[in-house]
Amino acid sequence: MRIAATNIGVSILEFLFFGGAILAAIITPFRQQRSRRKRSGELRMLARRMGFESFQPERDDNFARGWGFLSQLARGDNRYAFNVLRGSFHDETLFVFDYHYQSGSGKSTENHDCTMLMLIFKEVFPQLGIGPERLLKKIATALRLEADIQFESAEFSRKFCVQSPDKKFAYDVCNPQMIDYLLANPDLHIEIQGPTLMLTFEPLLSAGQIEYNLQRLAEIRSRLPQYLFTNV
């Protein structure tokens, strides 16, 4: 009788375990959908408050492909943008959007959601990546980018990895004013390539964090030497 009772207990535990797993598999997508709807509503309010020209909450594969020359938008698989806000900063086009991609494969597949802030210039620039030392080196290795560039500031070279095929351009961008600002904001990850300046944040930024980081994007833009925009 004790053996039978034990078997029944094991069966009940197995039923509860697998039943819980099935229930979680059913509930999780609904929670994710509800979370995304809530976020889209918050970003729609942000777009209205800050005067963005448009807001598109739907998944947009073409947007991701269109900017796929950027290293941050060429990582992993199943890449798409969503919650795309379009506006302007002075005379330059501004995009703020959420971005999804997958890394790994099979059981080791991981889903990543990021928030991107992107300015579009009239000029075209060489590729340049600036970010925390460990993070950017990891990305650079995967994407076979140039070795990191060293600067006179030992603190800056220790905390940040700067990579570009054009060292002069890297030194122009990482001028003393920019270096001071980045040392005070060590979480920033910057990419400049072609007509774009982009900041990347993972995980997703809240609406309030987006507003704050738009101010930081403006600070970075203000520290780019004006001659870069007159001699290109």
Image (spheres, rainbow, N blue to C red):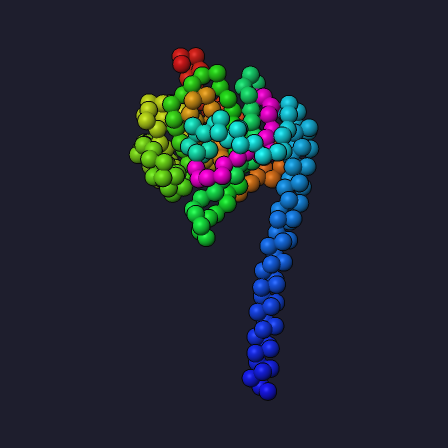
Residue under the point 43% across and 37% down: 75
Magenta span covers which residues? 75-89
Residue 180 at least partly seen: no
Question: Is residue 88 located in the magenta-colored stretch of the structure?
Answer: yes
Which corner quadrant holds the C terminus?
top left
> Image check: 36 left or right of 217?
right
Residue under the point 58% across and 73% down: 11
Q: Quadrant of residue 133?
A: top left
> Image check: 166 left or right of 87?
left
Locate residue 142, reporting x and y percent. Answer: 36, 39
In the foreground, 135 or 39: 39
Q: How many marks?
A: 0
In the foreground, 61 or 32: 61
Locate residue 216, reporting x and y percent. Answer: 53, 31
Q: Main secondary structure of the magenta part?
A: strand
Residue under the point 38% across and 26% down: 127
30 above or below 90?
below
Locate residue 66, reporting x and y percent. Answer: 49, 26
